Amino acid sequence: MYPKFTIREILSNRGRVELLGRLSSTRCSQQPWIDDGWLGYLQHQEYLFYGRWHTYGDLWGFVFEQDDKEVAVQAGEELIAYEGYWGERVELVVNENIDWQKAQFESRDE
């Protein structure tokens, strides 16, 4: 359903982590999903990495926006790729650190 990114190498790009690899597709549901310079997310288990896509011929690079992000991925692993808009919403679902509180709706209008 969503494009997959297979990691080939893990590099350093101006002090930031860059994953170099191959994308299964740059489209999702017939819509443009990934392109050179676009922001996006990669999902590895319950973790989401935020960064920017770059093309290098047949390969794609994903440069993390955070300088100090710890990366627990390895070459050969396959991650799910999201474009920037949907990636923000996916974080609400997969981020286990969000402490959701059940609450009864109370109207403030009178």
Image: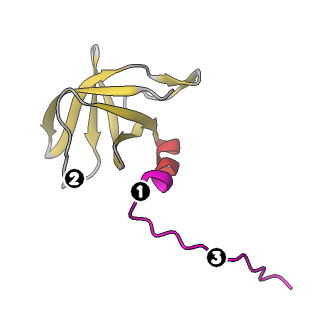
Q: Main secondary structure of the magenta part?
A: loop
**Residue lying furthest right:** 110
* CB-based contact (under 8 Å), mark 2 and mark 1: no
Measured Cα–Cα span from mark 1 to mark 3: 20 Å
**Residue 91, position as x, y percentages in the image:** 45, 52
Q: How many residues crowd around disc 1 within 10 Å: few (fewer than 14), some, or many (20 or more)? A: few
Q: Name above or below for residue 31 compared with residue 70.
A: above
First-in-chain label (2 vs 1): 2
Query: Label 3, label 2: how many angstroms apart (C-alpha)?
Result: 34 Å
- Give neighbour class at mark 3: few <14, some 14-19, many 20+ (Cα, 10 Å): few
Q: Which residue is mark 3?
A: 103
Residue in the picture at 14% in, 42% down: 14
- Amino acid of disc 1: Asn
Q: Is residue 81 magenta?
A: no
The stretch in magenta equals 91-110
Quarter of the image for the C terminus: give it. Answer: bottom right
| 46 horizontally vs 18: left or right | right
Which residue is disc 1 drawn over? 95
Q: Position of residue 109 (x, y in %)?
A: 82, 82
Label whose residue precedes the other's in the sequence (1 or 3): 1
Q: Amino acid at mark 2?
A: Lys
| Residue denoted by label 2 | 69
Between disc 3 and disc 2, the foreground one is 3
Vertical side of 3 occupied by 46: above or below: below
Asked which secondary structure carries label 1, the reply is loop
Q: Looking at the image, which residue is at 48% across and 50% down?
A: 88
The image quadrant of residue 38 is: top left
Closer to the camera in the image, 90 or 67: 90
Residue 105 vertical placement versus 18 (above, below): below
Q: Position of residue 5 (x, y in %)?
A: 33, 27
